[in-house]
């Protein structure tokens, strides 16, 4: 299970307070659901512009009295989110779409069109729309 919670606040102390409040609520939910978090996989990432200068030396997120570790990048629904928002995930999405196009080019004359459409949505469309949604772009689809 992956918990993804995006917070947008400034200054950093307010962000830290809000993040700790959210983590406390998540811990309560885990406890009431009789679930446990894997602390080796628990980390956080602070997304910011490369020109932003923030003092993050005292930033500490506590998760069940354990200090959560900071990460420089994270995979979220096929998108690579990086601390300084450098958009390097575009290469990953391009490789996935190229692979999907290659997979569709082979059997196009052997299968009915509805099968190709289903394969397109599974192999290609999900990467395009997922990336756009994660980047905050809304689509007006019919």
Image (cartoon, grey):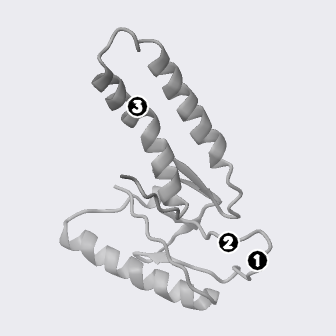
Q: Mark 1 points at which residue?
A: 52
Query: Do residues under tags 1 and 3 come within 8 Å of each other at their CB atoms?
Result: no
Mark toward the start of the polypeptide (1 vs 3): 1
Mark toward the start of the polypeptide (3 vs 2): 2
Numbered label tally: 3
Front residue of 135 and 88: 135
Mark 3 burial class by Cα count in 10 Å: few <14, some 14-19, many 20+ = some
Q: Note whether 19 is above or below 35 in the view shown.
A: below
Mark 2 burial class by Cα count in 10 Å: few <14, some 14-19, many 20+ = some
Question: Residue 68, how many percent across, how many down?
Answer: 52, 69
Report whether residue 76 is seen: no
Query: Do residues under tags 2 and 1 come within 8 Å of each other at their CB atoms?
Result: yes
Front residue of 98 and 1: 98
Give the SS element for disc 3: helix
Q: Name the residue under label 2.
A: 48
Front residue of 98 and 36: 98
Kindly report which numbered mark, 1 or 3, lies closer to the viewer in this rendering.
Answer: 3
- What residue appears at the point 47 percent right and 56 percent down from the top-left corner? 41
Gap between marks 2 and 1 measured at Cα: 7 Å
Query: Do residues under tags 3 and 2 come within 8 Å of each other at their CB atoms?
Result: no
Question: Residue 49, how many percent across, how many down?
Answer: 72, 71
Q: Note whether 124 is above or below 138 in the view shown.
A: above
Q: Which mark is residue 120?
A: 3
Question: Residue 17, how many percent across, how many down?
Answer: 50, 88
């Amino acid at each position: 299970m992956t918990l993804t919670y995006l917070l947008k606040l400034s200054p950093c102390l307010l962000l830290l307070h809000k993040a700790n409040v959210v983590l406390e609520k998540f811990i309560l939910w885990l406890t009431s659901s009789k679930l446990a978090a894997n602390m080796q996989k628990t980390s956080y990432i602070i997304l910011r512009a490369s020109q932003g200068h923030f003092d993050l030396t005292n930033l500490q997120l506590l998760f069940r009295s354990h200090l959560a570790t900071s990460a420089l990048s994270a995979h979220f629904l096929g998108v690579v989110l990086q601390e300084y928002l450098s958009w390097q995930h575009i290469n990953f999405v391009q490789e996935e779409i190229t692979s999907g196009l290659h997979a569709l080019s082979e059997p196009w004359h052997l299968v009915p069109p509805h099968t190709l459409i289903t394969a397109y949505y599974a192999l290609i469309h999900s990467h395009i729309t997922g990336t756009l949604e994660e980047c905050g772009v809304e689509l007006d689809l019919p």
